[in-house]
Amino acid sequence: MSKLDSKIPEGNLEEKWSKYKASCALVNPANKRSLEIIVVGSGLAGASAAASLAELGYKVKVFCFQDSARRAHSIAAQGGINAAKNYQNDGDSTYRLFYDTIKGGDYRAREGNVYRLAEVSANIIDQCVAQGVPLAREYGGMLSNRSFGGTQVQRTFYAAGQTGQQLLLGAYSGLQRQVGLGTVEMLARHEMLEVVTIEGKARGIIARDLVTGKLERHFGHAVLLCTGGYGNVFYLSTNAMGCNVTAAWKAHKKGAFFGNPCFTQIHPTCIPVSGDHQSKLTLMSESLRNDGRIWVPKKAGDVRKANEIPEEERDYYLERRYPAFGNLVPRDVASRAAKERCDAGFGVGTSKMAVFLDFKSAIERYGHNQAVKLGVQNPTAAQLKDFGKQVVEEKYGNLFEMYEQITGENPYEVAMRIYPAVHYTMGGLWVDYNLMTTVPGLYCLGEANFSDHGANRLGASALMQGLADGYFVLPYTIGAYLSKEISVKAISTDHEAFGIAEKAVQGQIDKFFAIKGTKSVDHFHKKLGKIMWDKCGMARNEKGLNEAILEIRQLREEFWKDVRVPGTNNELNPELEKAFRVADFLELGELMCMDALNRSESCGGHFREESQTEEGEALRNDDKFSYVSAWENKGDGKYELHKEELIFDVVHPSARSYK
Amino acid sequence: MSGNMNLTLRIWRQKSAKANGQLVTYPVKGISPDMSFLEMFDVLNEELINKGEEPIAFDHDCREGICGACSMFINGQPHGPKKGVTTCQLHMRSFKDGDTIVVEPWRAAAFPVIKDLTVDRAAFDRIIAKGGFISVNTGNAQDANNIPIPKTDADLSFNAAACIGCGACVATCKNSSAMLFVSAKISQLALLPQGQVERIARAKNMVAQMDEEGFGSCTNTGACEVECPKEISLENIARMNREYFMANIKE
Ligand SMILES: Cc1cc2nc3c(=O)[nH]c(=O)nc-3n(C[C@H](O)[C@H](O)[C@H](O)COP(=O)(O)OP(=O)(O)OC[C@H]3O[C@@H](n4cnc5c(N)ncnc54)[C@H](O)[C@@H]3O)c2cc1C
Ligand code: SF4
Ligand code: FES
């Protein structure tokens, strides 16, 4: 296990990071100017890292496949960002955020990393407000908070239902400022397709200019992958259409281990699938569970409309099963409970694969509060409803609009229908405390790494992690590596390693066009998605996983024989872009199933049907599985499992109960 | 197939920036009213690929109205007939069986066509790089609640910050003016105490870059506000004019 050194600093949990910062190696300003850093990705992680590194004086190049850095998928995050500010005086602290995150992750994350995350969380809010991010405020001018699933304090900061947009635009403005100053070169509409390593170290990338098709070579003393999650391996997910695993997967094939690939998060509150034309699923922010109540009819197969079902015939199953947390149980628990009800025949809507999310009581409650606030004596029922609606609109207006847009139904009047959907991937490239992968000089930040969320991510923690990594962690930890690289002159991209890498990419392009098959890339992607959702989705079992592995292998073979990629390489060619991505998903899917098969316990988002309690709750097995699975790619579809044992000095893993 | 609408699409096809383009007619069948406009394009593209033709290139990513990538000019309106939505949020229930729908790219000198319905909007990024920020380095910030901000200001600032940078305002404007976009960013920052320090330089530099990119001038037609999917208000333009005026006085 010598290969997997997590490099967690010695010392007490509370002191690890401050001691690290006080003693880590630094690079002096003159040397920074001659050190070049490649940042792939312009989401929260990439944009924040790139701007911060450029401010420090490094020469930075940033890549993204969208037409602008501002469109990275982080833009779509809705609900909020956590930070241990304790502005609400409700008992929050760094320790509590740390504890909630470790527990929420079902004790499958490192204490050291998570504590650091909680520690820097407060700085993130300060930084964003200083940048002019208009976070929600109270009438007194102070920042407002809401609560989010899996916690009992109010520590979530937000900007209506557009928190990700506002935070990303903040990070993007910092990035553009550096572009204007000439310290960052921004290459939009560029896709990284290979990592270049020289003498075992990451030294650059091969990127394709998506407009001209030209392959480009770029050198860097270090390379940062901030390329987001791989939820689109399921085809249908809440991720943007372009989200993919390609950058991480190419790195994996060049020696970076892949951590916990099977840990995927299924989000409980999404708009249900409406037909086979569906191209993506839309999330309804989890913040809705603060005020909305989730229920199904008590009678199986009930076809009445929500409004026609009287109170006593409704089963508020989360409140019933988990009285302490009710509708605010963590995502994995809420998702499985919805699936359980639907599988048992209590689902609603035409597909019967949906449950109700109802704002009736919230509208009533807020209506009364508002009437008192406004001093309206003896308000009429209509007035109360109007008042209530106004408050709900203020909090969730854009989400309600979005729902109506998609379904054609008005959620102020009728209960929403929701169902779980793939949302986030906790797995990703394995990194140590420095955020470095197993390839020296190759770092991984944000959703693309595996590090902080264990087997389940708490709501509002991804934005926190992305910005923590980019603003406050990596700018320190990269110094430890670069301080030893100051004597390395920029390597010419004529170096043979660049040539070999470029040739490999060109080879793959030629291969795609040579197949001239009969089926579109989407055809294969949809098939893969169905295998993954059915057999490696919300519930998994040995038989299904074994079948899935065989089916994926077969599908991959078909893909390479029969895919049709139209057009040419020398132009904007979205089908070619998709082909690259799906080719990698077809390999990743198999590894996810292998990982799920290996982990025969249930933990967090990973539910193995063989491992549950009599009441159907997930049953963890700490004796056997208190480790991170880090998979090494041995080539030719072979993988070797390495285990990083998880050590808990401070919190003691216990059964995760939200009852 | 999942629906029963039959439509005639007339779509702008243009091989590359330099090539000439033209409208090409494509019939589509079996469209469901629950499909989004882009899902209808997926159906058409799948058909084209299966027939051995080239699919239509268009920008899109989030498909939920927030990334600002999608950009189709539909029957003479950016993002189509429905108010307050992006192309990806437009559903086929906004059309009738038998309709003919004309789909073109954004048209503006500052947004050259790359291919088919895809245009280059990098000019927007270059304008932001000139001043759409507050110059604060990572690590310099004071405690966030040390700067109380009246809720009304914070809300107005947020409303302006909701701009998704799609460019519909430019596409709809007969002068191809980018005023609504630029003014939204200037307003967001001018409304906040943090934005005061650089107020003057920001307005001047961003406006200068806007002119340099070849966007036209604003003649107050108000078309941009009508077509903006995020309903960014014209008041922002008034605010920006005041900022710009002030900047010139302070010169
Ligand atoms: C609908 C939705 C709502 C969410 N809401 C919340 C929330 O309320 N709170 C929360 O904490 N989290 C939320 N999340 C999760 C969170 O948004 C993401 O985990 C986070 O934003 C990821 O940020 P990132 O910087 O790691 O990656 P991303 O923002 O996905 O950025 C990836 C970047 O990498 C680039 N890229 C990828 N591959 C390549 C390549 N090969 N070459 C070049 N560039 C490449 C892309 O262009 C992009 O710039 C939500 C997620 C979704 C899907
Ligand atoms: S102002 Fe409106 S139309 Fe213009 S770019 Fe912003 S969101 Fe789009
Ligand atoms: S695809 Fe993102 S706004 Fe339409």
Image: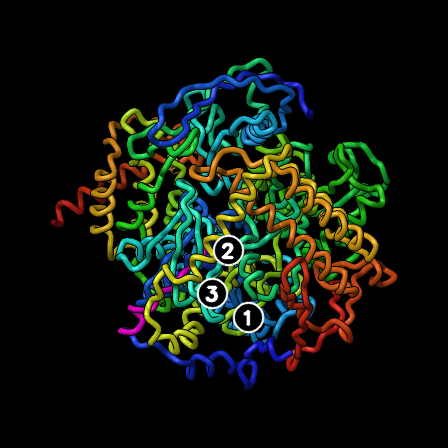
> Residue under mark 2: which chain is it in?
A
Image: A435 above or below A7:
above
Both labels 3 and 1 in a single chain: yes
Cβ of mark 2 under 8 Å from ligand 1: the answer is yes
Within 10 Å of disc 3 (Cα), the crowding (few <14, some 14-19, many 20+) is many
The residue closer to the viewer here, A428 or B125, is: A428
Viewer-nearest of labels 3 and 1?
3
Expressed as whole percent of the image width and height from the top left, the position of residue B191 reads: 32, 49
The picture places residue B46, in percent across and down from the top left corner, at 60, 30
> Which of label 2 and label 1 is nearer to you?
1
Of the residues shown, which amino acid type is indicated by label 1?
A: Thr
**Mark 2–mark 3 CB contact (< 8 Å):** no
* Residue A38 covered by magenta stretch: yes
**Is the residue at mark 2 from the same chain as the one at mark 3?**
yes
Q: Tell me whether circle 3 and circle 1 mark residues in contact (CB < 8 Å).
A: no
User: Distance between the Cα atoms at labels 2 and 3?
Assistant: 19 Å
As drawn, B122 above or below A98: above
Residue at screen point 57% across, 53% down = A245
* Sooner in the amino-acid sequence: mark 2 or mark 3: 3
Identify the residue at horizontal 54%, vertical 48% (top origin). A243
Check residue A197 in the rendering and tell me which mark sits there, or answer none. Answer: 3
> Does residue A553 lie above or below B99 as drawn?
below
Pick the quarter of the image with the N terminus of chain B: top right
Quick check: A491 left or right of A528?
left
Q: How is the image coloured?
A: rainbow
Q: Which residue is mark 1?
A: A438
Locate residue A49, reporting x and y percent.
Answer: 42, 62
Q: Amino acid at mark 2?
A: Thr
Magenta-drawn segment: A30-40
Residue corresponding to mark 2: A227
